[in-house]
Image (spheres, rainbow, N blue to C red):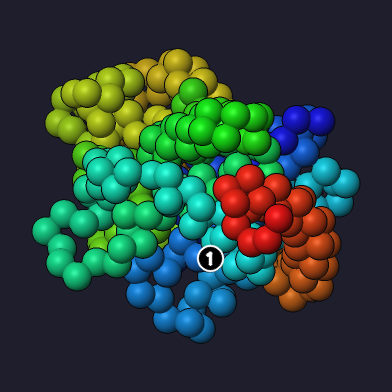
Amino acid sequence: MERLLTGLQPSGSLTIGNFSGGIRQVIDYQKNYETFLFVPDMHATTVPQDPYALHRNIKSAVGLYIACGVDVNLENMHLYIQSENLYHANLSWILECMTPFGELTRMHQFKEKTKNKEGFSAALATYPVLMASDILLYDAKYVPTGIDQKQHVELARNLAERFNERYKGDYFLMPEPVIPQIGAKIRDLKDPSKKMSKSAENTKGTIFLLDSEKDIRKKIMGATTDSDGIIKFDEENKPGLSNLLTIYSVFSGLSVDEIVEKFKGCGYGELKKSLADLLCEKLTAIQARYKEIMESDIIDKALDRGREYTEKIAREKYELIRKTVGYGRI
Ligand code: TYM
């Protein structure tokens, strides 16, 4: 079975954007690939985190993966926490030594996250290398993510190629980003020029998977649209409305064309109300399963099994790479 790998940072509570770009794809592909789904907790500390909140968000993330439909009973599903496996950071160091600093500071996310900021951590620049290490350690062929992570997966490809060429061998498999056709970038409901983010300062534009019905309705009804009143998918001229149609498609399984047809001649209010109903129905079902999962031992069992399995693979790969670069004794 080919391998598929992805992770979602526990830097806050997960959003419908994370569902769309990350979790949903894992659920769609989980039966066909050996799946490595992990919590990149070390990525979260690129910015300061409250330790207690971080612990809580890690467990909550895993609870949500499972509540959304990740099947921990599948033999080929491996759930684990990045920091419980020391090889991720070790491989990252070796790869960092092969990455020109300029390649990191030119990345979109680095520029965005550091814009008008001072005193940010060096890890904000180097974290894509840790991400490359997360991927390359396991010879993952497919990396499902939203569009925002595509450049980072491309860095992993560059590093794999660079390493294989320098040391003349097939040490790393070339990973491929898997970006969904629809919902690769869910936008902020209040400011559709931005992507919806779990760490946005204004949470009115973000729907969290654990939001209450009241909040979901309020946020959808208050979403920014435009004034021409025509329901049409046009990301350039009608980014707010197109975003609502995209979210509708992600959660209903209908195509955007089908949704436009369904709401032909209706006002935006009607579309918003129907979308709010849909999200409330889907998210309350997820939340009910989440509550049960959080009170059970499913999470710990899955993580223990995942840690044991994935650590062995990571250790073997790391040992090979460590010797290849000349570390330690012959
Ligand atoms: P993170 O935690 O920012 O996002 C997790 C996943 O959700 C996707 N995503 C979105 N998709 C659509 N619309 C949005 N508004 C939206 N916001 C987020 C992201 O693209 C991602 O798929 N560096 C990664 C985590 C990571 C990782 C990895 C991913 C660490 N190591 C190895 C894949 C492979 C990150 O910060 O994602």
Residue at the far bottom in the pictured view = 52
Residue pictured at 26% horizontal, 35% vertical = 240
Q: Can you identify the residue that label 1 sits on? A: 41
Q: Is residue 203 visible?
A: no
Report the label total: 1
| Residue 14 image point, x, y percent | 49, 58
Q: Residue at x 41, y 55 (%)?
A: 127
Query: With 252 as the anchor, is 121 left or right in this view?
Result: left
Q: Nearer the viewer, residue 318 or 132?
A: 318
Residue 144 shown left or right of residue 146 in the figure = right
Up-down relation of residue 315 to residue 234 (above or below) = below
Taking 317 as reference, is 109 left or right? left
Seen in the picture, residue 299 relative to 238 is either above or below; the reply is below
Report the residue at 63% width, 66% height from top: 86
- Is the N terminus in the top left, top right, bottom left or bottom right quadrant? top right
Evaluate whether residue 254 shows in this view: yes
Which residue type does callout 1 highlight? Asp
Q: From the image, which quarter does the C terminus lie in?
A: bottom right
Residue 156 coordinates in the image, percent (x, y): 49, 38
Q: Secondary structure at mark 1?
A: helix
* x and y percentages locating residue 307 in the rendered image: 76, 62
How crowded pointer 1 is (Cα within 10 Å; few <14, some 14-19, many 20+) is rated as: many
